[in-house]
Image (cartoon, rainbow, N blue to C red):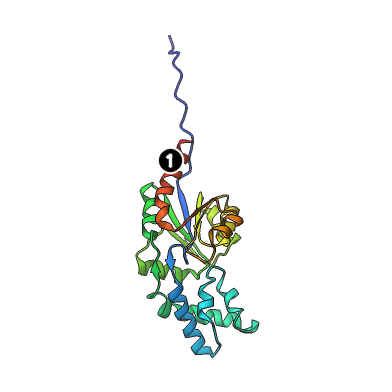
Amino acid sequence: MASTASSPLPAPHTAPLTVGFDLDMTLIDSRPGIAAAFRALSAETGVHVDEELVVSRIGPPLEEELAHWFPAGQVAAAGDRYRELYPDHAIAPSTALAGARESIAAVRALGGRAIVVTAKYEPNAKLHLAHLGIEPDSVIGWLWAEAKGEALREHGAQVYVGDHVGDVRGARVAGALSVAVTTGPCDERELRAAGADVVLADLTEFPAWLRTFEANRTTA
């Protein structure tokens, strides 16, 4: 006689954990380095740049910032020169933000992949990460706001962590959960108004949050 016991139901399929991170003011404090690179560009071109103002609004693409200081016809050349000056002036002064390395490690500890999706020129982003010993699985550069969402979607990211309202918009496009940190130019009110799902003071709070998120995701 055939057994009447029911067969166990297959476990629900859950995609592997993938977490995206912004770079500037999320994983690293690049303000000293960016200020130094702008000082070098200003000295070389003779164009005045208020570096304190520049570093107070880090996030959008470089050319948007340069347009505040250079005539429209000079912005592209200034951007090219800035990126050339950047490795010698901006890498050494920049530091890892509190919790950055631990957050990457937390993703790995859960068997996940950590990727960096940033508006920064990709080779310079990789120089920062290598200098600071932060080793994500992938680095995708030169993407801002909604364009970040396309890369996040391609990599199957369920979470995107950033400090800017543009990062929130990128997460929305990807259908990813937006986790925002208040270590950049946008405060909690701005981030929540933009649609952030979670707002943390900084990345030191992220590993514990991620463990809870993953436990809920895999048992839902």
**Would residue 137 be seen by someone viewing this image from the given angle?**
no
Residue sitting at x 34%, y 65% = 133
> Is 19 located above or below residue 166 in the figure?
above
If the image is split into quadrants, where does the N terminus sit? top left
> Is 47 located above or below residue 203 in the figure?
below
> Is 199 located above or below residue 13 in the figure?
below
Horizontal and vertical percent for residue 208?
40, 48
Residue sitting at x 54%, y 90% = 46
The number of numbered discs placed on residues in the rendered structure image is: 1
- The extreme right residue here reads 72
Residue sitting at x 53%, y 89% = 45
**Would residue 98 be seen by someone viewing this image from the given angle?**
yes
Three-letter residue code for mark 1: Ala
> Is 138 located above or below residue 121 in the figure?
above
Front residue of 173 and 6? 173
In the picture of the structure, the residue carrying the numbered disc 1 is 215
Horizontal side, residue 171 vs residue 114: left or right: right
Horizontal and vertical percent for residue 12?
48, 34
Q: Residues within 10 Å of mark 1 (few under 14, many from 20)?
A: few
